[in-house]
Image (cartoon, rainbow, N blue to C red):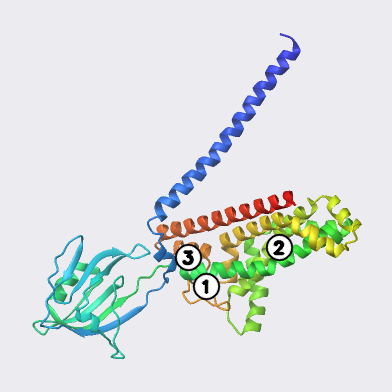
Amino acid sequence: MDNNEKKLKIRKIKDILLNGITYIFSSFGIVILIVLLTFIFSNGAKSLSWKTITSNYYEEAYFAKCETNEELTFSLEDGNDIYYSKVWGIGLKDSKDLENNPVVKIVYIDNLSPLKNALDQNTNERILVLKGQIIKRIQMVNTNGERSIISAKYGSQAIVDALDNSYQINELYYATMGGGIRGSLLTTLYLIFLTLIISLPLGIIASLYLSQFAKDNKLTKIIRSFIDMTSGIPSIIFGLVGVIVFIPIVNGVTSSSGGNIISGALTMTIMLLPTIIRTCEESLRAIPKSYTHASLALGASQTQTIMKVILPNSIPGILTSTLLALGRIIGESAALIFAIGSSIKDSISLTGSSTTLAVHIWSVLSGENPNYEQACAISILIIIIVLVLNVLVKLVSKKLNRFEVKS
């Protein structure tokens, strides 16, 4: 065997080893991703529903009173874990709320049920008792004239037995189902909209200056170095800037107090600008110089060339930077805990504190009893949103590239 054959054999062995190492580490990453997604979907799929997405986080409590109609008796039979009150015409079931806590849920109410004529305890106006609401506590008067109180912790069967032996309800404490994420989802959408309308114009203008107008000298090199350095700053420091700078400014202008969506959007803007500037600048530099020379040779000004030639051809790159910005906004939590707040709200306003979906996950996991099911459910929603946005951006970029090729 000559030297050339030995070298060839050694090279093949090295290639096999290097390829094997590459496959091993790639497989390791894929396995971790599969395990992570399996854990999230297996724990969160049951908790994620349209009702979870559209419901409020906090329960809305009601207090009602009513009396039975002694002439009416409802012929209802228990079944399927549902217990029916033949005196009050209502069906109850032991269930769980959106946060996986045990509750007694109203699953049936007859049209002739006395509860249809229930009155608000304070205003004496008619109040609705509906399916899907949960019973917290009932104070009633039984057939012997004795008063008793029973709470939801005793279960639906015990409540139905007590109701069937009573003729008057002095206080029916019931509530809507809580645990939804509607407020956090709205906050996330508001934050995305505000951040993008602030950061995208600034980022595109800055990238146009650096790629089209700025001279290649020490000053522009220093500016690019600062941009790159800013993109590596931990997000918690940007949150500190939001607390010190943006929150006082927004509070002074809007007469609000504490963190809010506007201060969060400004904080996210300074976080995203380096990424948007660098991505847009690279997309602008990728456009062939011949496009610019041809436009100028035909008599177009530099401004017309930029607006009608360079920018339209760089839209795929701008969309990519937008996608990166969206992913960062949706997934950010550390900075927003300071800039917006960590209190979950159902009533959302631009000048009020609230939580995004990522901060909502932090909130439900930071208590004494972490709710992993709801955290996983929100994680699934975030993954779906990011996936849909990725697909949309890819489709738009593909169509734009086809149009450019045809034209």
Other-residue count near label 2 (Cα within 10 Å), few / some / many at <14 / 14–19 / ≥20: many
Residue tagged 1: 354
Q: Nearer the viewer, residue 144 or 399?
A: 399
Residue at 17 percent of width and 69 percent of height: 84
Q: Looking at the image, is 168 positioned above or below residue 43?
A: below
Residue at 28 percent of width and 90 percent of height: 124
- In the picture, the disc for residue 363 is 3
Q: Position of residue 327 (x, y in %)?
A: 60, 58
Q: Looking at the image, is 386 positioned above or below residue 243?
A: above
State the image quarter where residue 266 is shown.
bottom right
CB under 8 Å between discs 1 and 3: no
Residue tagged 2: 273
Residue at 64 percent of width and 56 percent of height: 324
- What amino acid is at disc 3? Ser
> Is residue 188 shown left or right of residue 230?
left
Q: Position of residue 40 (x, y in %)?
A: 45, 52
Q: Which one is earlier in the sequence, the residue at label 3 or at label 2?
A: 2
> Is residue 360 shown left or right of residue 297?
left
Q: Which one is earlier in the sequence, the residue at label 1 or at label 3?
A: 1
- What amino acid is at disc 2? Leu
- What amino acid is at disc 1? Ser
At mark 2, the secondary structure is helix
Give the spatial CA distance, label 2 vs label 1. Answer: 24 Å
Give the spatial CA distance, label 3 vs label 2. Answer: 28 Å
